Amino acid sequence: MSNELWKAAILKSIDESYDGTSGVYLDSGTNTLTELRALTGEQATKVLPGAGNSVANQVKHLLTTVQMHRPQFEGGEYPDLDWGADWDTVPLTDEEWADLVNQFAATRELLKGWIAQPTVAEDADYVAAAIMVVAHMAYHIGQIRHAAGYAANA
Amino acid sequence: MTATVPVSSVKAALRAALTETFDSVFGMYLDKGDTMWESLDGLTAEQVSVPIYPGSNSIASQVNHMIFYFDVMAQYMRNDPPKERPDWGLAWKLVEVDEEQWAELKRALAERQAELYMLIDDSPDEIFADPDVLGGTYGIVAHTAFHLGQIKHAKAAQGLG
C-alpha cells in the first residue's frame, strides 16, 4: 500500500478532529474549533461533577500529548512532561481561554506535518503511531464535546 | 519510487487500536480500566438511560448509535454500500432501556466487534486500496474512540468513575 494512501486517511481524520466534517467520524455540521471558540473562559473551566475536569483540562491534555508525540515522529528523547498539571482546575479569563484554543488549533499543522513527512517504507511503528494520534484525539474530542454541551447547558 | 507499507502493517495497527479501545489497554492511548467493555460492564439499565443533560443522549443511545454505524461501515467494507442515505438520527431516538434491552445492546455491540475484526482480518488486501474503505476503517477507530470518550464522560457525570 502506498504511504500516500494510508496517510491520506489519517490526515482526513486529523482535519475532522479540528474543524469541518468529511464523513470520517463526526456528525455532519460538527466543528470542534468553532464550538471551543464559542465558550467563555468561565464555561471552558466549568468542572463537570463526577469527572473532576473541564473542557480546558481536556484541551491542555491534548497540547501535552502533542509534545509527547514529537519524538515518535522526529526522534530524540521523550520530554519530561507534567501530565498532572493539565488536570489542575484553574479559572481562565476569556483571553487566556482564547489563547489556549489558538495553541490547540496550531497543533493541527504540526501533527499533519509529522504524518506527511517522508518515512521509511515498511515502518510498522510509524503506522501505529499515526493511528494512535487519531484514536487519542477522537477519544478526547468525544469528552470535550460532552463537557462543552454540559458547560453550555448546565 | 513510491514508498509503501505492507497492508498487514496497516491491518495490525487497526487491530491494535481496536483491541485497546474495546478490550485491553497496552499503552496505545487509553489509561488502564478505560476500555469499552470495562466501561460498560456492570452498568445497570437505569444508569445507561440517563442523559448527561436534559434533552441530550444517554449511554444506551451511544451504544445503539455505534451499532448502527458499524452496520453502515460494514456494508462499505463488503463493497456493498447502502443504496439509500442512512438515517443517522434513528439510532439516537433510543434513550431509555430496560435491563433486557440493555443486555441485548451489549450483545449486539460484541457481535459487531467480532464481525469488524473478521472483516479486517479476512478482507483481501486489495479492498484496502480503496480510499473509501481504508478511510472508513480508520473512521471506525476514531468513531469508536470518540464515543468511548463520551461514555466515559457520561459515567463520570453520574459519579460512576
Image (tube, grey):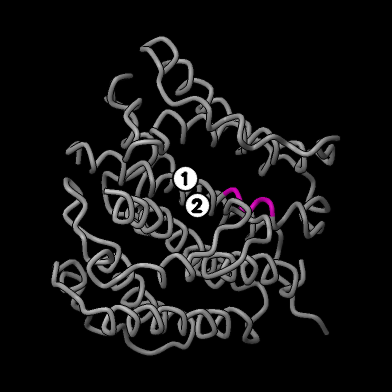
Tell which of B96 and B37 is nearer to you: B96
**Percent coordinates x, y for residue B99 in the rendering:** 36, 12
Badge 1 vs badge 2, beta-carbon distance below 8 Å: yes
Residue at 82% across / 56% down in the picture? B130
Q: Indicate the quadrant where residue B161 lies.
A: top left
Q: Which residue is mark 2?
A: B16
Q: Is residue A67 left or right of B70 when viewed as pictured?
A: left
Question: Residue B138 magenta-drawn?
Answer: yes
> Which residue shows up at 34% across the image and 36% down it?
B54
Disc 1 and disc 2 on one polypeptide chain: yes
Please rate how many residues cluster around mark 2, counting C-alpha atoms within 10 Å: few if below 14, some from 14 to 19, many from 20: some
- Name the residue at the top extreme: B100
**Residue linked to disc 1:** B19
Chain ID of residue with mark 2: B
B83, B10: nearer the viewer: B83
Left or right of A75 on screen, residue B141: right
Write down the quadrant of residue B40 in the picture. top left
User: Above or below — where is B22 with respect to A58?
Assistant: above
Q: Quadrant of the N terminus of chain B?
A: bottom right
- Residue A74: within the magenta? no
Residue A154 image point, x, y percent: 26, 48
Give the chain of mark 1: B
B35 shown above or below A47: above
Q: Position of residue B124 (x, y in %)?
A: 79, 46
Crowdedness of circle 1 by 10 Å Cα count: few (<14), some, many (20+)?
A: some
Judge left or right: residue B62 versus residue B86. Answer: left
Name the amino acid type tagged 2. Answer: Ala
Magenta part of the chain: B136-140
Describe the element under mark 1 as helix, strand or loop.
helix
Which residue is drawn at the image coordinates 32% and 37% (left, top)? B39
